[in-house]
Amino acid sequence: MPEKDLTLAIERRERAGSTHSHALRRSGKVPAVLYGHGTTPQHIAFDARMFDDLMHRGGRSSLITLTLNGRKADTALVRELQRDPLTRKIIHADLQRVSVDEEVHTSVTVVAVGVPLGVREYGGVLDMITRELEIAGPVNRLPAQLEIDVSELSIHDHITASQVRLPDGFKLLTPGEQTVASVEASRTAAQLEEAEAAAAAPAEELEPEVIGEEAPTEAPPEQRESSE
């Protein structure tokens, strides 16, 4: 399970801009912006490895205690992450200040639990169509992730957003009819199913060929002359 108590040491940066940000990344840090509660956005930075570890342990929706010079500075949520398109490393982050007693709207990761019936018995494939749900609720009880039990899903079964169980006090903002996960037949299984259906179908009846008298062949010219 994701950890709940996460702490990240930050440092203020006086300069912004691409040149300074590139220098920070080369030194193993992530440039970021901290905003919220009507205050002026602050340019900050933190250790890239520590932040990667924090995201792995807690997930994007976890509350983070920010420390500055060893003292608690703020409580924040991750609002946006930018990644390098090739390396997938985090190259920038937006953090939002929050109070522990306020209600927030945020995205929470959806995690599938179990192996679907359609996968283990019929060779199907689990497709996670929606990996995050938008929810609203008290920030001090914000779940690190939402789990869905997919073990009973057979071929063509699915789970919608409205079927995902939320903690008490939270409401769903994502459209309830949106599909979160589904189990579909694999290509090989689908082809086999089509072949079996075709084999079971009655054979197409062919119309019998009509055999009649051949039309008389016109006599050669010389025969017509002799008969006239």
Image (cartoon, rainbow, N blue to C red):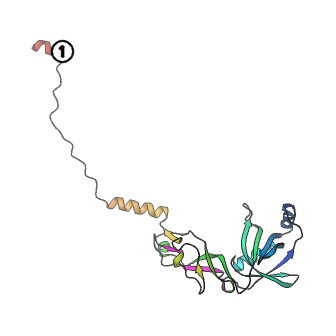
The residue lying toward the viewer, choosing from 57 and 188, is: 57
> Residue 221's image quarter?
top left
The residue lying toward the viewer, choosing from 27 and 114, is: 27
**61 lies left or right of 37:** left
> Residue 80's image quarter?
bottom right
| 36 up-or-down from 169: above or below | above
**192 lies left or right of 177:** left
Q: Is residue 151 magenta?
A: yes
Q: Residue at x 39, y 59 (%)?
A: 195
The residue lying toward the viewer, choosing from 111 and 94, is: 94
Q: Is residue 193 magenta?
A: no
| 78 up-or-down from 204: above or below | below
Residue 67 seen in the figure: yes
User: Magenta segment, which residues?
Assistant: 141-160
Residue 91 in picture, x, y percent from top left: 78, 66
| 148 up-or-down from 128: above or below | below
Residue hosting label 1? 221
Residue 124 seen in the figure: no
Residue 37 in picture, x, y percent from top left: 76, 78
| 188 up-or-down from 105: above or below | above
Mark 1 element type: helix
Quadrant (top left/top right/bottom left/bottom right) for the N terminus: bottom right
Q: Looking at numbered disc 1 in the image, what kind of residue is underneath it?
A: Pro
Quadrant (top left/top right/bottom left/bottom right) for the C terminus: top left
**156 lies left or right of 94:** left
The mark tally for this picture is: 1
Q: Residue at x 74, y 84 (%)?
A: 99
The residue lying toward the viewer, choosing from 112 and 22, is: 22
Q: Residue at x 63, y 75 (%)?
A: 109
Residue 121 in picture, x, y percent from top left: 46, 73
